[in-house]
Amino acid sequence: MNAHTSTTATIPSADSLIATEQALGAHNYKPIDVVLTKGEGVWVWDTDGTKYLDCLSAYSAVNQGHCHPRILEAMVSQAQRLTLTSRAFRNDQLAPFYEELAALTGSHKILPMNSGAEAVESAIKAVRKWGYEVRGVPENQAEIIVCSNNFHGRTIGVVGFSTDPTARTNFGPFAPGFKVVPFGDLTAFEDAVTPNTVGFLVEPIQGEAGVIIPPQGYFPAVRKLCTDHGITLILDEIQTGLGRTGKLLAESHEGIEADVTLIGKALSGGFYPVSAVLSNTEVLGVLQPGQHGSTFGGNPLACAIARAALKALVEEGMIENSAKMGAYFMERLRAIRSNKVREVRGRGLMLAVELHPEAGGARRYCEALRRKGVLAKDTHETTIRIAPPLVITEDQVDWAIERFEAVLGGMEI
Ligand SMILES: *Cc1c(COP(=O)(O)O)cnc(C)c1O
């Protein structure tokens, strides 16, 4: 057998790839059994060549669409030049990355990290330190308030203040210093504040909880309470940020500005893990040399990719398209006549279809959608989350709606 035949003969089938994953991988995910091998814009292809419209966008990490050519070009050309120096030395991509991100977001200080959870951890560290050194909170007494049904990542620190039993059971003991209040409940937040409260960590819209939008007026009131009590408002925009909700940052819908903003996911357009803590000078100003760091944080490859990802987002009008196509998608979803749908909600292209409990679980509908060529993800039993890349066109929304209509409206389950 020559080399060529032997390669072709050993291309594994989707079933055997799934079996190998199952045998060798930790079972910490339960994916829909579609094995993807290629992506372009809103489309992805599986190993059998079947094409799907991606309505998850890797949880909003590929807002710019799969394999965006400008980001790809930036990645390849930077990878050929310099990838990693560590922060022991400087690199020529970090400064322009800071400059462009600061200009875009109006931030004064930036801390580059890799994953979203790391950005969350970094913000917690900085805000605690700020509490002791600037606010004068007694040693080890700093408190951070968080919300029930939050999702801020998977580290020990972060799952310690999760309210999801699946995320936290048997992972303890956890770090103290966190208080949980119901999301959207201003009185509960106010009651939880003590002189030692240094920060309030919250998502503008709770994504993993099922696209939960807080009551109108909640965030402006939260902003005022934080200002009045000297509490740092930390908005986790890792999922809501960078155009997903039809604005650069979801805080704009509320007419507020956070003291600390966390971004990640689409900051690289899905090419590489890049996250950042954005803040005013006071909070990140407490970090001195040696007190915090990351081998890969701020590396030239990450910075070059993030610069291109931000340019694509802004220069190609993706944020405006998210607002426009989001409104259109929601209107068309709401027009589907189905006794299975309880509610359609969302902002921009962060959408969710809430099913009646009697509908039999969102997973079945996601499996049915997959058979029709739409990849969407169920969450919390009854929610189908819809978050396509921000480059989606009206025709592509129409294409998706036909499938949603068939699955939600018809008997084809
Ligand atoms: C995805 C996500 C995170 C965690 O990001 P990772 O890169 O997976 O660590 C944190 N917060 C929110 C709101 C997220 O959606």
Image (tube, grey):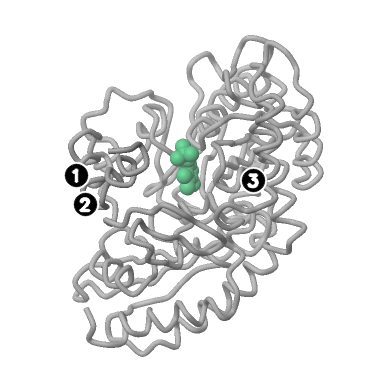
Query: Is 322 in front, or is 134?
Result: 322
Residue in the image at 21% along x and 52% along y: 15
Query: Is 108 in front, or is 25?
Result: 25
Image coords of residue 240 (percent x, y) = 56, 54
Q: Residues within 10 Å of mark 1 (few under 14, many from 20)?
A: few
Q: Residues within 10 Å of mark 2 (few under 14, many from 20)?
A: few
Q: Which residue is mark 3?
A: 72
Sooner in the amino-acid sequence: mark 2 or mark 3:
2
Q: Which residue is mark 2?
A: 15
Q: Residues within 10 Å of mark 3 (few under 14, many from 20)?
A: some
Residue in the image at 75% along x and 39% along y: 107
Give the residue furthest to the front.
1
Q: Quadrant of the C terminus?
A: bottom left
Do the residues bearing badges 2 and 1 touch, measured as CB atoms within 8 Å? yes
Is residue 189 visible to us here? no
Query: Is 401 in front, or is 320?
Result: 401
Quadrant of residue 49 within the rendered picture? bottom left
Measure the alpha-carbon separation of dots 2 and 1: 6 Å
Quadrant of residue 294 within the rendered picture? top right
Image coords of residue 266 (percent x, y) = 58, 48
Amino acid type of the residue tagged 2 in the rendering: Asp
135 versus 250 height, above or below: above
Do the residues bearing badges 2 and 3 touch, measured as CB atoms within 8 Å? no
Q: Quadrant of the N terminus?
A: top left
Measure the alpha-carbon separation of dots 1 and 3: 31 Å
Image coords of residue 332 (percent x, y) = 49, 84
Q: Is mark 2 within 8 Å of ligand 1?
A: no
225 versus 328 height, above or below: above
Residue in the image at 53% along x and 28% along y: 124
Q: Which residue is mark 1?
A: 19
Circle 3 sits in a helix, a strand or a loop, which is it?
A: helix
